[in-house]
Image (tube, rainbow, N blue to C red):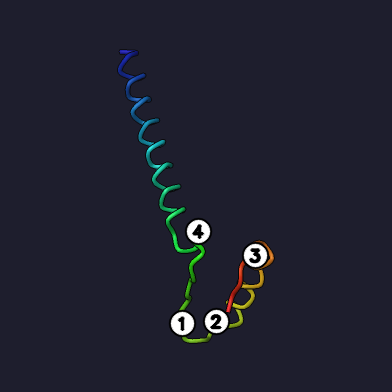
Amino acid sequence: MGNRKVMKMRKISAFRTGVAILICLFATLSPAARGEEIKIGGTGNALGTMRLLGEAFNKKYPNTTQQ
């Protein structure tokens, strides 16, 4: 009975590790990670909010630019 629990825990651990690896892989393949341009569309009602978010982003990541 104990072996079944150990095997089940190993499978769960392997699954979680696989999911974590996939998340990291997709994160590095994103446009932002590759240094590409990210566009945010909208009607313009939230323009002030977008500017504040952009300023906060630039403070955290000073080597980036925004338009």
Q: Residue at x 38, y 42 (%)?
A: 19
> Which residue matches tag 2?
46
Task: Judge the density around disc 2: few (<14), some (14-19), many (≥20) Cα neighbours within 10 Å.
Answer: few
Q: In the figure, residue 9 lies in which quadrant?
A: top left
> Which residue matches tag 4?
33
Q: Earlier in the sequence, mark 4 or mark 1?
A: 4
Secondary structure under tag 2 reads loop
Q: Residue at x 66, y 72 (%)?
A: 55
Q: Earlier in the sequence, mark 2 or mark 4?
A: 4
Q: CA distance from mark 2 to mark 3?
A: 25 Å
Question: Are the two marked residues, 3 and 4, in contact with CB atoms closer than 8 angstroms?
Answer: no
Query: Residue 65: where, in percent of width, then height?
Result: 61, 72
Drawn side of residue 46 relative to residue 25, left or right: right
> Which residue matches tag 3?
63
The amino acid type found where label 2 is placed reads Ala
> Which residue matches tag 1?
42
